[in-house]
Amino acid sequence: MKLIRISAVLLVTAISFLGAQKASAQVEIGVKVSPSITYQRTLAPKGIDLKSDGASVGIGFGVIADYFFGTNYAFHSGVIFNVKGGSFTSQYTDAFGNNIKFESENSLHYIEIPLAIKLYTNEVAPDIRVYFNAGGTLNTLVGARLDGEKADEEGEKYTKQFNLFEVGAIVGAGAEWQLGESTKFFGGLTYQHGLTNVNDSLGGEDSKIELKNSLFSLDFGIKF
């Protein structure tokens, strides 16, 4: 229910901006690529030793759109393929008194739809403007690897061990250069903070163990 409420608020906000400003809006569409450093935050109850054990290198790319409803204001969205993941270790005692310890590295592949507000400054140099953006992102899992493998020994895909949907918050900043009448190059930095647990199966259904994604990316792209 929490995921549904968050998604509904973001979608209603987006629709409101698009509908209210349709008459004066200008749409700029482009492509971007985003190399990233990604890791996973862990949360576990007392008695369970679960901790992050390293970051991974990821990559994102896709189509983006800026829907301007003012000279310096835009609604930002798009469709992005992104790779996240990281390493973690876990140690706990099960119901039979056995000490369970394992290490794992996962790579999660998402299709993401960012929903953010983008604010531009006036020109800070000829044909250059600085921008800031903040909002959320709705993500759908499309692939997963665990320790480099897509499936376990029985052939069951690891995507079934991870949650299908993820919601995150994003903040970022960068600069945009006007290269021609309608062509712009941009570069920036984005931080994505996962808000929802990506794996409910760790330690059992009632263990309250949480694993959440975090990502820092360098963004490069062109708008047309």
Image: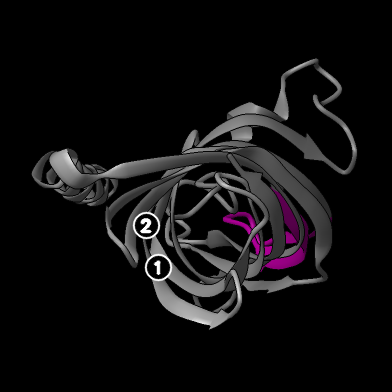
The numbered disc on residue 134 is 1
User: Is the magenta region chiefly helix, strand or loop?
Assistant: strand
Hey, which residue is sitting farthest bottom in the picture? 124
| In this rendering, position of residue 58 left or right of residue 43 | right
**Mark 1: amino acid:** Ala
The dot on residue 116 is 2
Q: Determine the residue located farthest toward the top in the rendered image.
A: 155
Q: Could you say whether the residue bearing mark 1 is in a helix, strand or loop?
A: strand
**Nearer-the-camera pick, 204 or 34:** 34
Instruction: Say which residue appears at 70% left-offset and 73% top-offset.
Output: 51
Q: Residue at x 87, y 32 (%)?
A: 149
Q: Is residue 170 visible?
A: yes
Q: Secondary structure at mark 2?
A: strand
Residue 186 is inside the magenta segment: no
Q: Are marks 2 and 1 in contact (CB under 8 Å)?
A: yes
> Label 2 is placed on what type of residue?
Ala
Image position, residue 155 (x, y; %): 80, 15
User: Can you give x and y, in whole percent of width and height, for residue 193 in the image?
Assistant: 51, 66
Q: Residues within 10 Å of mark 2 (few under 14, many from 20)?
A: many
Q: Considering only vertical position in the picture, is 176 above or below 124? A: above
Q: Is residue 128 above or below residue 26?
A: below
- The CA span between labels 2 and 1 is 5 Å
Q: Left or right: where does residue 190 sit relative to residue 7?
A: right
Is residue 86 highlighted in magenta?
Answer: yes
Mark 2 or mark 1, which has the lower sequence index?
2
Magenta range = 84-103
Please state the horizontal and vertical placement of residue 220, each as a whole percent of the image: 72, 56
Residue 6 x %, y %: 25, 52
- Is residue 88 or residue 16 the one in the foreground? 16
